[in-house]
Image (cartoon, rainbow, N blue to C red):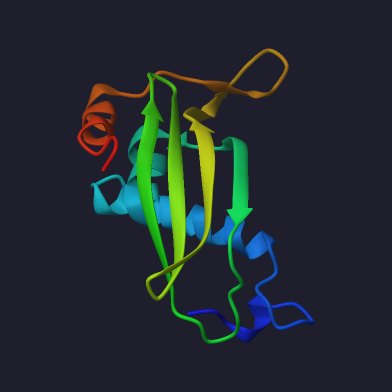
Amino acid sequence: MVELGETDAAGVVFYPNYFRWFDRATHNFLGAIGLPQRELLEEFQLTQPIIDCGCKFVGPLHYDDKVRIETKITDLNDCMFRLDHVVYREDVLVGSGFEVRIWVKTDERGADGKLLAVTIPPVIAERLKGKWGQ
């Protein structure tokens, strides 16, 4: 449901909100396949920062519109994955987007202090592979 605070002066959803929704959809997707953020952080010290993203706007969304986002993995390797998101108002397509994320350990950094991409543990890889393209 679109909240009033998510709209601009014209009454249309302000575009950065799509990226907030994509982020939430990603976390919901991972949780639904048994990879909740809390477990990834506490058990594996893993997080997934975005290294690329985009959005295409097909139609407007307004206050109180019911929004549905479908999310699926469309690319996957040992340290990176891509999720595609499709946004609907009821059953009408209004936008789409993507996120490319890498896996990093929150407790490991390179010599320059930056986070490093890491190979994900097999248990996580198997859960992701089981949902690739779904």
- The answer to whether any part of residue 36 appears in the image is no
Q: Is 28 situated left or right of 18 in this image?
A: left
Of residues 109 and 128, the one drawn nearer to the viewer in this rendering: 128
Q: How many numbered marks, from 0 up? A: 0
Where is the C terminus found, in terms of image quarters?
top left
Q: Give x and y (percent) for residue 10.
A: 77, 82
Q: Residue at x 52, y 61 (%)?
A: 21
Name the residue furthest top.
111
Q: Give x and y (percent) for residue 20.
A: 58, 59
Q: Residue at x 35, y 45 (%)?
A: 72
Of residues 114 and 79, the one drawn nearer to the viewer in this rendering: 79
Q: Residue at x 38, y 19 (%)?
A: 78
Q: Quadrant of residue 19?
A: bottom right
Of residues 103 and 86, the one drawn nearer to the viewer in this rendering: 86
Q: Quadrant of residue 114?
A: top right
Of residues 55 and 23, the one drawn nearer to the viewer in this rendering: 55
Reply above or below: 38 against 68: above
- The answer to whether any part of residue 11 appears in the image is yes
Q: Give x and y (percent) for residue 94.
A: 52, 65
Q: Give x and y (percent) for residue 39.
A: 33, 45
Q: Is 39 situated left or right of 123 in this image?
A: right
Reply above or below: 84 against 107: below
